[in-house]
Image (tube, rainbow, N blue to C red):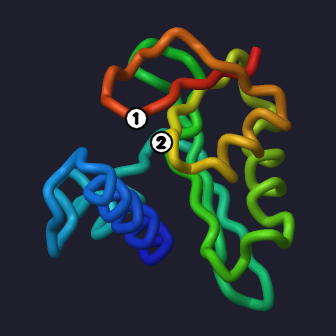
């Protein structure tokens, strides 16, 4: 699980730097290093679902509760080699099972494939709860 989290967080930081939202950096910000080093501790109280294909972990989704008490998808990552094979759809579908609605998530506006997947599943734009530039807030009723 640590390697999936590390890939997801590093890719996100690279993309944010490419869009001028953060300075390029060689290492993850401190707030993310703890999550990678101690995922069980950092993700306490969440539901972590890991996808495996061909004997290897290839994706994950983390579902938890936001500060406001709403159900929230907090992390979602599929390794590039596993994309286009239904792994992401299966992860999100499993994450949505038995979760109180509404469920919300935030996604960077440049992650168009993920946004299309969310919209296909019925997520719609929501009143923003996070005002970071380039971040879309979506909700499924």
Q: Is residue 133 above or below residue 35?
A: above
Q: Quadrant of the C terminus?
A: top right
Q: Is residue 140 above or below residue 12?
A: above
Mark 2–mark 1 Cα distance, whole angstroms, equals 6 Å
* Left or right relative to 140: residue 9: left
Q: Quadrant of residue 8?
A: bottom left
Identify the residue shown where x is 34% and y is 67%: 10
Number of residues whose C-alpha sits closer than 10 Å to that of mark 2, classed few (under 14), some (14–19) or many (20 or more): some
Number of marks: 2
Q: Is residue 110 left or right of residue 81?
A: left
Residue of label 2:
108
Q: Quadrant of residue 96?
A: top right
Please state the horizontal and vertical placement of residue 62, each as a whole percent of the image.
Answer: 56, 48
Q: Is residue 81 above or below residue 104?
A: below
Front-most of residues 24 and 59: 24
Q: What is the residue that sits farthest to the bottom in this orientation?
A: 55
Q: Nearer the viewer, residue 14 or 9?
A: 14
Q: Which mark is residue 134?
A: 1
Give the image location of residue 1, x and y in percent. 50, 71
Q: Earlier in the sequence, mark 2 or mark 1?
A: 2
Left/right of residue 59 with respect to residue 31 in the rendered view: right
Secondary structure under the numbered disc 2 in the rendered image: strand
- Which residue lies at the image location 75% right of the left edge and 90% below the top edge? 55
Residue 53, image x, y percentages: 78, 82
Residue 44: x, y in percent?
43, 46
| Figure quadrant of residue 102 | top right
Find residue 103 and name its label: none
Q: Are marks 2 and 1 in contact (CB under 8 Å)?
A: yes
The answer to whether 59 appears left or right of 53 in the picture is left
């Amino acid at each position: 699980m640590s390697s999936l989290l590390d890939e997801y967080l590093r890719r996100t930081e690279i993309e944010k730097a490419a869009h001028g939202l953060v300075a390029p950096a060689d290492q993850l910000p401190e707030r993310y290093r703890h999550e990678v080093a101690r995922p069980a501790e950092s993700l306490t109280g969440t539901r972590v679902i890991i996808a495996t294909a061909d004997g290897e972990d290839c994706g994950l989704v983390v579902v938890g509760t936001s500060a406001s008490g709403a159900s929230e998808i907090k992390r979602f990552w599929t390794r590039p080699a596993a994309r286009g094979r239904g792994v992401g759809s299966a992860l999100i579908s499993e994450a949505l099972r038995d979760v109180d609605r509404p469920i919300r998530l935030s996604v960077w506006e440049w992650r168009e494939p993920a946004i299309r997947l969310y919209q296909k599943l019925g997520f719609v734009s929501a009143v923003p709860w996070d005002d970071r530039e380039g971040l879309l807030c979506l909700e499924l009723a």
